[in-house]
Image (cartoon, helix red, strand yellow):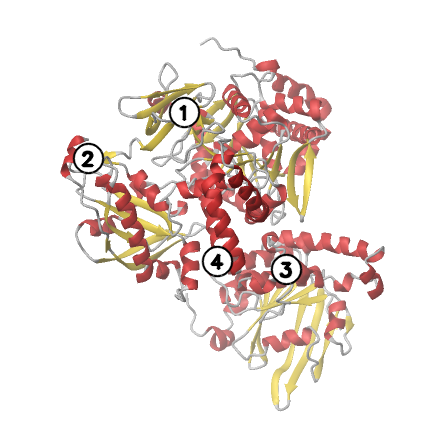
Amino acid sequence: MLDQTEGYTTEDGRKIGGVVMEMKNITLRFGGVVAIQDISFDVREGEIRAIIGPNGAGKSSMLNVISGFYNPQEGEVWYKGEKRPQMKPYQVAQQGIARTFQNIALFEGMSVLDNVMTGRIRQMKSGLLAQSLWKGKAEREEVENRAFVERIIDFLEIQHIRKTPVGRLPYGLKKRVELARALAAEPSILLLDEPMAGMNVEEKEDMSRFVLDVNDEFGTTIVLIEHDMGVVMDLSDRVVVMDYGKKIGDGTPDEVRSNQAVIDAYLGVAHD
Amino acid sequence: MAQSSRGADGLSSIPALLQRNAAQFGARPAYREKEYGIWQSWTWAEAEQEIEALALGLLNLGVDKGDFIAIIGRNRPYFYWSMVAAQSVGAIPVPVYQDSASDEMAYVLDHCGARFAVAEDQEQVDKIIDIQDDLHQFEHMIYVDPRGLRKYDHSKLHQFAQVQEQGRAAKDSLMSELTARRDALDYDSTCVMLYTSGTTGKPKGVVLSNRNIIEASKSSSEFDHLTRNEEVLAYLPMAWVGDFIFSIGQAYWCGFCVNCPESPDTMQVNLREIGPTYYFAPPRVFEGQLTNVMIRMEDASRMKQWLFHTFMAHARKVGPAILDGKSVSGWDRLKYKLGGLLVYGPLKDTLGLGRVRVGYTAGEAIGPEIFDFYRSLGINLKQLYGQTEASVFITLQPDGEVYSDTVGVAAPGVELKIAESGEVFYRGDGVFEEYYKNAESTASTKDAEGWVATGDAGFIDEATGHLKIIDRAKDVGKMADGSLFAPKYVENKLKFYPNILEAVVFGNQREQCTAFINIDLNAVGNWAERNNIGYASYQELAGHPRVLETVKEHVEEVNRSLAEDPMLAHCQVHRFLVLHKELDADDGEMTRTRKVRRGVISEKFEELLGALYDGSEEKFTTTEVTYEDGRKGSISATLKIVEAQVVPVAQEKVAAE
């Protein structure tokens, strides 16, 4: 069933692999409200996949289905060629899917470094006792994980706030710290919920560059929700468009841009 | 002049000094850089190997003798190695300001005809790719950080580590060529070419020979008794002559360790971690640190505030005297010691200046209160006066003879002369060879006897024997009534207030002086927060009535102090306005070393300048701004023009002048 055909090559020469995740006929209801109605799409390995749509279209609900926070009433999620059973979010995380949140969910009182370290929890195997005694394996593990986290701190250029409590940081940097924590989990799929919301032009440009670099450097597959159309069109390889819980378009940015249903629902009158 | 083409002990080039250091104390640290949260270090022996591998790699890429190699990046060991590797193969390193916009970079690369460039990362590589079509002589680019560059066409693009790798692989065939080229270097060969920022016109390429750099480094190191045990933090732009002298000239001559910060934003933290013993910073850095201390003290508990203020008052009274070794009563000494334990020591440590043995500031005048603050803490902060054309050192303040308003005595090996016009001239071993491809400017700056015009007006202070600088010679003008107009002098007085970041004073050939002022967002923003003044932008804060009121008080205080000096009483500021944007190098209003470009500013803000003189009370204006990525936008505002009180000047005083 699963379409494992060879991938494609993007305009800028990146090789996109086969399908890594597929959503099949997903329907999600909250009581009588239908948040997502019969939506299907796939995500290919190494690609930047965007989900767009007006407010209330069901984008975040979709992301929450992928991350296991919601379980859809109908439909199936296929991941790496297997149908995924009902899972708790932590189980999904263990499968290599990490995410950031629209409203930033960091530990405000902890330092940036400690926040990012929490992203490594999946890689820490030593027990409670060993960790509290701080001997042998626990110490070795912490050193290894710290080294990994330092590379991410360097990558995202947040060395200057390493020891700063997150609560004292401006919004744009918090977003970056959240991305760092997600990356620390070495995800194979990274889910970004409105990574540029509320940012100024410069912060958006920085964040776009980081998203591209993460994809390029680590080969991470990225699924993102974003409002800023300019950003979406520049960043993504393929775009799913949602409106009132339904899928109304799916394709490359150019295809989506010229899709009449999409123009009517989301873009309104074309600007140029 | 009969000069030997070889330096002392045959050490006539930087590569020769490198070999000496690696042979004599190869196990001592030469470079440190913080990366991934840990200080990584390289010994002199390791540095020599890195540089040799890179030099071989450069030969392998086809670098010829006399080629120019542009070096574009922030202070990292790789770029210092690149400079020395370039010298080793007979090429000339040309460090370029890494925050230059593409067209500024294009000018420099085109002017020197660089065939090669060593660039830091994607940002710099992109800039060069943008301009390389116009640079017909340009061939290869080497980059350090591969991030984002994987998909680029690599036919003319090389990774730093790979160039070294290829160099190591080709060692057998290329080593003899490298040795031959390295041994051919003598005192007359070019060591480096540095572009001056230029407050007017296009930058000029200053050619400095090995003699210039090594003699200047040697005599200045001896002047301050620098040894191989010094620690310095390299954080000032590599394209600036000061960094070249401190981090290469003196570092190689003495053999001390150069520490590179983790990122530009971590400089303050890294400063604390390293605790340099030899430290240079322009006045604005010291000002910024002091402002931060004061802001943080206001948040401290009452007890701490009391301790701080009590002991700082005592430090101001006796600290400088103790530092200069003058006699101070035993009781005062004891109290100062106690203060050291409770306040000065911890404070110096926080500032990262706890171990500073020799500290310098230069480039601009430093406010006396700021200068005294650091000296009273027991930090041996001194002033020097220098230029790119002099390989930095023209005058220096000796230990024990430090004043906030002089720049010191002639540096060892330097002669000084004050011309009729008041302009300062000097000559010595550090004097540059020429401006590259600009014989006309060379001739107008340096005469046949080797005297160089500084472009600054100054005089020798009779009481101290030190040189005092008044202003840029070409900025010193006459007002309409014939009295002296020295804008920089007035601007400096204004800038000594923490609230004022920049000031530009006008008045040449005019009846009265007026000024543009930039507020310091840090200091004024903090004040606004304390006083519950909300603001959304720099522009809004700059136009706030209470901010204008405060600035007005500062201007009036300056006017009162100017009135006491008969020579300068006419430079009192009658009217001023607070600009709606910060003066910025990206908009061409300042140089990359942050000196104001008067000409550009008075043209660009012509209508505002007009409004200062036509009696209007406010003026609407629209200004074009350039963003960091080169795009343009505009901001507009209605600026209030403020009248400041001036002290009337008696007419006889002027006549007496």
Q: Where residue A230 sits: x, y (%)?
A: 49, 64
For label 3, count other residues whose C-alpha is less than 10 Å away and answer few (under 14), some (14-19) or many (20+).
Answer: many
Discs 3/2, front: 2
Q: How many marks?
A: 4
For label 2, count other residues whose C-alpha is less than 10 Å away and answer few (under 14), some (14-19) or many (20+).
Answer: many
Q: Which residue is mark 2?
A: B483
Q: Is residue B206 left or right of residue B58?
A: left
Q: Which residue is mark 3?
A: A112
Q: Secondary structure at mark 3?
A: helix
- Among numbered discs 1 and 2, the one appearing first in the sequence: 1
Checking the image for residue A248, the label placed there is none
Distance CA(mark 1)–CA(mark 2): 39 Å
Above or below A19: residue B268: above
Discs 2/4, front: 4
- In this view, the residue in front, B166 or B576, is B576
Q: Residue at x 76, y 76 (%)?
A: A87
Checking the image for residue B437, the label placed there is 1
Q: Residue at x 66, y 21 (%)?
A: B20
